[in-house]
Image (spheres, helix red, strand yellow):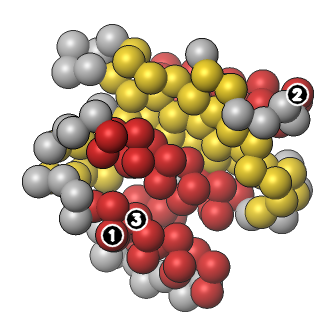
Amino acid sequence: MVFSDGGARGNPGPAAIAFIIQSETGQAVIARSSYIGVCTNNQAEYRALLAALEAVAARKTEKVICHLDSELVVKQLSGEYMVKNKELKQLWKKVQAMVNQFKEVKFVNVPRDQSVIQEVDRLVNMTLDTSAGDRKF
């Protein structure tokens, strides 16, 4: 399972991404965050998901469930919403290309008060507070 989040302070503004990959038993296997420069919140959400999918693909995982607190991104990826923004469309295309590396991918919108999403959000904010680039926990 993947839990990802991205955030920007200002829109656009300084932004960071984070993700946690859990085993099937719910144990955290990988947790990472990165400062990504200036972008919008939605761009950061997509970039967090891309980073998580790249990490999962490196583990040779066949099926992945991606949990995001961004309803917009989940609905765009599921085809319920069209992607009209040019920058988001490019990121959407990158996610679609990554999806082809797996047998099955699901995108699930979760509330912001979900415990793992809260932890991922904490990593995003910690990275923004320190603006120290890549961090591994």
Up the image or down, 17 lies above or below 38; here it is above
Q: Are marks 1 and 3 in contact (CB under 8 Å)?
A: yes
Disc 2 crowd, CA 10 A, few/some/many (<14, 14-19, 20+): few
Instruction: State left or right for residue 73 relative to residue 128.
Output: left
- Identify the amino acid type marked 2: Thr
Residue 6 % position (x, y) = 64, 47
Q: Are marks 1 and 2 in contact (CB under 8 Å)?
A: no
Q: Residue at x 50, y 40 (%)?
A: 4
Residue 83 % position (x, y) = 49, 82
Marks 3/2: CA–CA distance: 28 Å
In the rendered image, which quarter is residue 86 located in?
bottom right
Label 2, on which residue?
130
Residue 66 % position (x, y) = 34, 44
Check the picture and name the quadrant holding the N terminus. Answer: top left
Label 1, on which residue?
97
Instruction: State left or right for residue 101 relative to residue 16.
Output: left
- Identify the amino acid type marked 3: Val
Q: Residue at x 68, y 26 (%)?
A: 135
Q: Nearer the viewer, residue 101 or 118?
A: 101
- Identify the amino acid type marked 1: Ala
Disc 3 crowd, CA 10 A, few/some/many (<14, 14-19, 20+): some
Q: Residue at x 50, y 64 (%)?
A: 72
Label 3, on which residue?
95
Residue 121 in view here? no
Q: Nearer the viewer, residue 68 or 35?
A: 35
Residue 136 % position (x, y) = 61, 22
In the rendered image, which quarter is residue 127 located in?
top right
Dot 1: element: helix
